[in-house]
Image: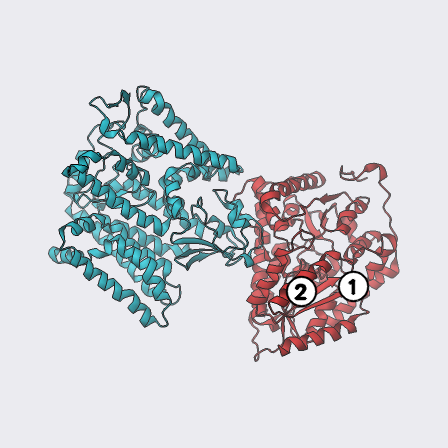
Amino acid sequence: MTSLIHSVAEALSPLASPFLSLVTAVVLIPAARQARSTRIALARLFIPVVLFMLAYHGLLFLPLAARWLKALESPVWVAILLVVLPAMHLPRNGDWRWFRLVPACFVALLAWGIWQGSRSVPPEAPRVIGILVRPGWLIAGVASVLVLIQPFLSLNLFRRAVHITALCVLAAGGFMLRQDYTDFRDMRARRTVRRDVMNLSETSPVMGRDGRLAYLPSAPCRFSPDGGYIQGCNMELSQRILQLNYRKIAGHDVAELGALEAVLAAFLSFTILSFLVARWCCGWLCPLSTMGDGLDWLRHRLGVTPIRAGPATHAAMLGSGGTLAGIGLAMSALYHHLDATGRAFGVRIPVFPFCKMCPSQQICPMINAGPAGYPPLPGTEWAFGFFRYGCLIVLALYVLCFAAARRLWCRFCPMGMISGLFNRGGSFMLRKDAKRCNGCGMCAEACPMNIGKVRDEMQESNVSTYDCVLCLRCVAVCPRDGCLALEHEGHEVTRSHFGTGT
Amino acid sequence: MTKPTSQYDPRYRLDPVKAPNPGARKRARMAVHHLDETMRRITRRPENIEWFESLLREGPTEDSARPPVGYFCNMIPPELILACGGRPVRLDCGNAALVQTGEEVLSGEICPVAKASFAMFLDPENPVHRCRCLVLPSSCDAKRKLGEVLADYRPTFTMNLPAEQDAGRYLAAAAKELERLADFLSRELGTSPSRRRLMEAIDLTRRRTALVRELDMARADKPGALSVRDFFIMIQSSFTGVDLVRWEKEVGTVLEHTRKYHQPRERLRPRLVLTGAPILWPNFKVLNLVEECGADIVGDTLCTGVQSVWDPVSLDETGYGALLRALAARYIFAAPCPCFVSQGRRVSRVLELAEERRAQGVLHYGLRLCQLFDVETYRLNRVLRQKGIPFLNLRTDYSLEDTEQLRVRLEAFLETVEAS
C-alpha cells in the first residue's frame, strides 16, 4: 500500500515542478481559452501536460538535471497548479461544480493525512502532535479550503481570511509541516540550541529530512518559530547568495557548491512565483502586513483618519529602504571574512545582518513564545551600535507606519521593492474600463499605498503600478460594476460590483 | 429672527419679499392636475403609485420630529442632513406655473428651475417656509446667486464647489467645504453629525441605490414593465424628506409588480438614452412626448432621474474625515453636472449606457437659459456622431406651447432611429 502510494507520488512528481505551473499559466491556459470547443481546449491543455511529464521523467535519468529538478520541486506548485490556477481561470458557470471536486479531494486528503499522522504518534506525546501532516497535504489542503470558502465571502473578508490563514501556517508551520513524528522530534531537538539571533544556528535553515524547502515569495520569515519548510523571503535568499564563498566555489568545494545550488534553485522557483503573482503576496500573504493590519484595524475601528503621505515621503521611504537593504546586503557579503570572534576587519557584524534589521526577525519569534520570545537586543559592540539602535528605529517605523499611515511601510520594504518589478509585465494586471469610471476617486481613497494612477488614468486600461500590492481594495470599493478588474494572463479573476454590504 | 451666516454681507440684508398670489397657486395646482390626467393614460402602472404621487403633491404625511432642511441640486449630500437630525427635502421645482411668478420678482434671464424654485418662497403659505435652513451648491450662476437671495428668507449655506472634478487635487478642499456645511447644519439643527449616524444614513441611501438599480435593470430588460414617468416619480418622491425605510417598502411592492410583467412579444419600440437638464415633476413634458411617440427611455444621466441615485457612497475608511471625503467623492466628483470644466463624466456615461442598454439613439433635453447644458451639446453631438449613434437635442423650457413642435421633431427623429 505504502509503496504503491510512493510510486504514484513519484510518477506525479512533475506536477511539483515550477516549470509546469509557469507553462500552464502563461501558454497552455491562454491557448485553451482561445479554442473553439471544449474538447479542443481540453486537448490543448492536457496533451502538452502529459508530454511535459514524460519529458520530465526522461530528464530525471540525467544525474545533473535530476539534481536540479528535484531541488526545484515543492508542494506549493502542486497546490498552485491543481487548485489555485483553475480556481482563477475556470469560468464560474455550471461546470464550476465539477472543479470543486478537486479542492474537496485535497481537503479529504488533508483530513486523511492528519488521521494518519495522529496514528503514528506514540501515546506519550502531547495530543496536539496528532495534527502533524505532510507539507504537501497541508499546503494543498489549506489552498483548497480557501478556494472553497471564497464564493461566500466578500473580497475584503476573503483577503482577511487568506491573511489569517497564511499567518497561522507560518506560526504553526514548523510544528505542523512535518513528515512524521520522527521528523517532528528531530525538529524539537534542533530547537534546544540556544537562541542567539546575532550569530545563531537557529537562523540557519531548518530543513526537513529531504533537505528541500517550499518557497513562497515575500511571505514567511524563517525567524518564525522554526521556519520549517516554508521559506520565502527574497531578501534572505539574496543575503545567502552574497554570503557564499565564491573562491571556494571556483575551487569546486562540494559543500559550498551544494549551498549555491540550493539557493539558486530557491531563487529560480521564487522568481517564477513572483512572475505569476507579483506583489499580490504583499497584499495577501505577508505576515508583517497581517500583523500590521491588526494595528490598522484598531485605527480603523477608532475612526482615526489615516495619514496620507505625499510623494516626497514616498520617495524618502523608497530611498531609505533601499539604502538600508544595500547596507545589510553589503555586510552579509563579509560573511566569509568573519573571524572566530565574529569580526570582519575589526567590526563585529551578525551572521544575518539584513535580517537583524528587519522587523520580521523581531516580531516573528514572538508568535508562539509571546513577549518572552522577543530577541535580545544586540549590544553596542555590534557595528558600533548600528544594530542596537537601527533595529529599534526600524521597528518603531514599522509600528508607526501601520498604526497611522496604512501601508506606508510597504514603500520602505525592500522585499516588496523586488516583487514590485513583476507588477507590470508579470501575470497579474489591474484593468480599468475608463468608460465605466465615474471619477469619484474612491479607488485612490481606499488605496492603502496612496496610488493615484487607478483614479487618474483615463486612457490606458492597464493601471498596474510598481507600488501596487494588489490588495484589491479599489476593486472592492468601486461603485461601478466592471470598471475595475483583476486579470491574470488576460483572464478576469474578479471585478468591481456594487453590493449593499460594504 | 434668523441668524445671518458670514457668507453674505449682513449690511445689505433685505426683508424677504412675499407676494400672496392665489392665482399662481391655482395655476400651479392645475399644472399638477394636468400631469395627473396625462399619466392616467399609462396602461400599466403600479397600484401604489398614488402613494408616491401624494408625496410629491403634499409631502410626506407622517408626522416626523425631524425638522425639514431644504436643499438644491444633487450635489448636496442628503446623508449629512440626515446625520444632523434633519429631513432632507430637495426644493428644485418643476412647476411651469411658478416660473412666471419667479420671473416677475427675480429676473427673466435665469433658468426656469431657479425661477420656479424661488417662486415657492414668494408664497407665504408654501411649505418651503417650514424648512429650518437651506443649502445649495455654487454649481451654476443661478444657484450661485440664489443663495444670497434665499438667505433673506431662511438661514442659507452656499457650498463652494471646485471648478474641476479632479479628486486628486480638490478632494481635500471639497471635504473641507462639507465640514463647513456640517458645522452650519449642526448649528442650525442643534445636532452634530456623528460617525455612527453618518454611516447609518449612508447605509440608507445605499439601500435606495440598490433598489433603484434593480428596478432600472428590470426596466432596461423589459421597458414595458414600468413607465419611465412612474419611475421618475418614485425616484423624485424619495427626495421629499420621506422616511426612506417606508419608501423602500413601497418600492419593494413596485419591484414585485415589475417582476410579474411578461412582455407579450418582442418589443419594437425604439430604445433611447436620455441625457441633459433635470426633468422635475410635474414638468414631464419631454417624458410624456417620448412615451406617447412610442419610444422607451432605457437609461438616463439626469440629476433628477436614475442617475441621481445610481452611484452609491462607497465606504472604506470610517473616520469622520474619511466619511466626508467619501461623500465629497460621490456627490461632487462623480456628478455628471455640466458646471465643471470637463464633460467627460457625462459623455462616458452616455456612451456606456448606449452600449450596455442597446439604445438606438440619444435624446438630449436642453433647458432654455441653461448655457452649460447648451454648450455641452457641441461635444456630445459630435462624439456620438463619430460613434454612429443618432442624437437629438430638444431645447425647450417649462411651457407647454411648443409641445406639438417638439412632437414633430421627435417623431422625425424616431423615424430615422428606426430606419437605421
Q: Residues within 10 Å of mark 2 (few under 14, many from 20)?
A: some
| Secondary structure under the numbered disc 2 in the rendered image | helix
* First in residue order: circle 2 vs circle 1: 2
Q: Is residue B73 above or below residue A290?
A: below
Q: Which residue appears at 13% of the width and 51% of the height? A: A63
Residue type marked 2 = Asn
- Mark 2 sits on what residue? B381
**Residue B419: x and y, percent?**
63, 79
Shown in cyan, the chain is A
Residue B341 has which mark? none
Q: Chain of mark 1?
A: B
Drawn side of residue B177 relative to residue A27, left or right: right
Q: Colour of chain B?
A: red
Residue at (24%, 23%) from the top-left corner? A342
Judge whether A340 appears above or below B50 on screen. Answer: above
Q: What residue did someone put label 1 on?
A: B398
Q: Is residue B178 left or right of residue A237?
A: right
- Looking at the picture, the colour scheme in use is by chain
Callouts 2 and 1 in the same chain: yes
Q: Is residue A186 left or right of residue A389?
A: left
Locate residue A112: give its quadrant.
bottom left
Please, what is the three-letter code of the amino acid marked with disc 1? Tyr
